[in-house]
Amino acid sequence: MAEELLILLKGTDCNKGAVAMLKTHLLDYFECTINSRSDSIAVRHNDNEISFSELKQQSQKVGSLLMEITGAAVNTPIAVFLPKEINAVIADIGIMYSSNPFMNLDVKTPHERIMNIFDLVKPAAVITSRKFSKILSDVDVPVIIIDEIDWNSIIVDESTLLSRRRLLIDTDPFCLINTSGSTGTPKGVVLNHRSFFDFMAVSNDRFDFDGSEVLGSLSPIVFDIFDFELCMLMCNGSQIVLLDAMLAAFPARLLEKLVDYRVNFIFWVPSIMVNIANMGLLDKIALPDLRLVWFAGEVFPTKQFLVWYDKLPDTVFANLYGPIEITLDCTYYVVEERPNESEPLPIGIPYHNTDVLLLNDENEKCKIGEEGELCVRGTSLAMGYYNNPEKTAAAFTQNPLNNSYPEMIYRTGDMAYMREDGNIMFKGRKDSLIKHMGYRIELGEIEHVIENELKLVEYCCAVYQYEKKEIVLYYQNNSELTEKDFRTALSKVFPAYMIPSVYIKMDELPRNTNGKIDRLTLKNKANNPEE
Amino acid sequence: MNSDILSMLEEIKPEFDFNDSEDFVMDGLLDSFDIITLISMLEEKYGITIDGLDIVPENFSSLDSIANLVVKSGGKA
């Protein structure tokens, strides 16, 4: 293809003015980044590393291979079944080059759950490694084994990759993220390109990212935080240091890694940071390079937060809030003055170009101080749940404040109120969704599977013990089951973080007046054992 | 002490056979949540405080290494 046509197709000539540079795909940003950072290290993982230009070359090869295997398919999910390693980054960007969205899966997910996801999403292919391919032996989609690819034999036809990409628009899917649903099959949240680079634009504005960031990446590849880190790499040229999940169990080692790799930005879930604070490690290991700390995913208890805040006076801390369905986060609170230990941290103010509505039971806007459901409006909204119109319709609804034309809002199910100073305060959930170890879990899913799929007990109710951070299962059954019985059966269908820690048999579960199991009573029982 | 530690591990993860494992951490028997639970059980049982710098994989790989950690932290069998 002629050089001029290539440039025309790219539409990513960085020297052109802002209006001419319409970027509709994350790769448009990545290819601009490459220009200035080709030899810099893009990703590090233990003793391995890959430069930006190598990352581009290998990803393009994966993209070409996928194009060959899946034929004309665009916008069709491709699954990634890999541990967190450099190959997972190559796979994700490779899938982008094939003009398809990636769907990262956790290699620790039990086989049955993987099969449920495959049945629902029907990915066009799956990328895995030799070690994990055995688990996928019975899937009926093409399997690419990334560590067996003969890289030299793949010829990249850049112009074909580009012309396919130019058929896409910015609201086409960037990735799918599976999240716990109320049945045994997760919901696949579909997130588009626009929502990610919108988030990058406002973040760059607020936090002055310039590519000098070294991100200490601790989230599993199935978290949206990992997708944010990918975007930092692609849009800003920031470096990602992949930290093994095992390190979360050994915080001292984790902090040593941050020092060794000169990590200056972390975006973690609070649980690990609470452990670090409780172990007194910040007194023993200095983190002079760390200049920015973001946290999200669950409430950071102020007492432990203050340990971080006091030990790292030169570090900027920000509390972010947002469910997966609104792409990363929709509000943020930069901690600019020392918080009062007895008060929770605010979730802050909405990001630019995102509107947060607090709606009461009458679907009216809440007054200052009045609690209501937090709803979100803006381009950050997910496209919906993949192959799941019912669940989509329930969560993405018409904005009740607008009767004039179709306009979607996402109803988070989170309760919140606005403080006098304009900061939003998180209060809790409307339903039985919890955040546990950074994962979002629908307690109803645990109950549904135990009662109806595994048929372990007659009735059960799962509640969360907030102080100990453990899931407690109350059950009613003729015979008592041992903890081992439960755990053995559940570990075949659930990832470890969804398996309850405590099992309590009751003669009869409490019920409310309309005969439903009284979740609130059980929740109080678990959280106030003396009562 | 080893048998007490084994019962703690079995309480945390009854579905695993710890006698079968050469290295609890490398074999993936203990995740971060389990390590924290085990530490609080050890601290309570032996009246000790385990230094955060000692919470490293080598000290949790086997019954012997966990017992050594308890002794190092001032615990008596």
Image (cartoon, coloured by chain):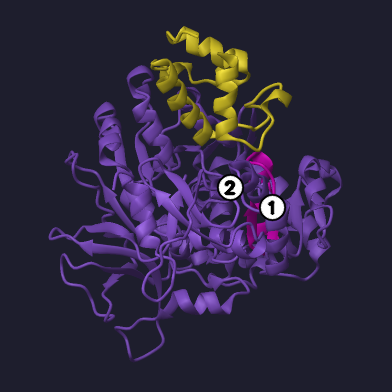
Chain colours: A purple, B yellow
Q: How crowded is mark 2: few (under 14 residues within 10 Å), some or many (20 or more)?
A: many
Q: Which mark is residue A237?
A: none
Question: Left of A276 or right of it: where is A184?
Answer: right
Q: Is residue A93 magenta?
A: yes
In this orientation, which residue lies closer to the viewer: A334 or A324? Answer: A324
In the rendering, at what x and y percent does residue A462 appear? 48, 56
Whether tag 1 and tag 2 are in contact, CB under 8 A, the answer is yes
Q: In the displayed structure, would residue A275 be above or below residue A109?
A: above
Q: Can residue A413 be seen in this view?
A: yes
Left or right: A522, with A390 as reference point: left
Three-letter amino acid code at the position of disc 1: Val
The chain that hosts pointer 2 is: A
Q: Name above or below for residue A399 compared with residue A278.
A: below
* Residue corresponding to mark 1: A80
Give the number of marks.
2
Range drawn in magenta: A78-105
Residue A99 forms part of the magenta stretch: yes
Residue, far bottom: A404
SS class, disc 2: loop
Q: Do labels 1 and 2 share a chain?
A: yes
- Residue B62 percent coordinates (x, y): 63, 18
Q: Which residue is located at x 42 percent, y 70 percent? A: A379
Determine the residue located farthest toward the left in the rendered image. Answer: A420
Q: Which residue is the site of mark 2?
A: A221
- Where is residue B9? Give x, y as percent: 57, 28
- Quarter of the image for residue A400 reads bottom left
Classify mark 1: residues with Cα within 10 Å, few (<14), some (14-19) or many (20+). many
Tell me which chain the residue with mark 1 is part of. A
Residue at disc 1, secondary structure: strand
Q: Which residue is drawn at 51% across and 63% down?
A: A444
| Residue type pointed to by label 2 | Ile
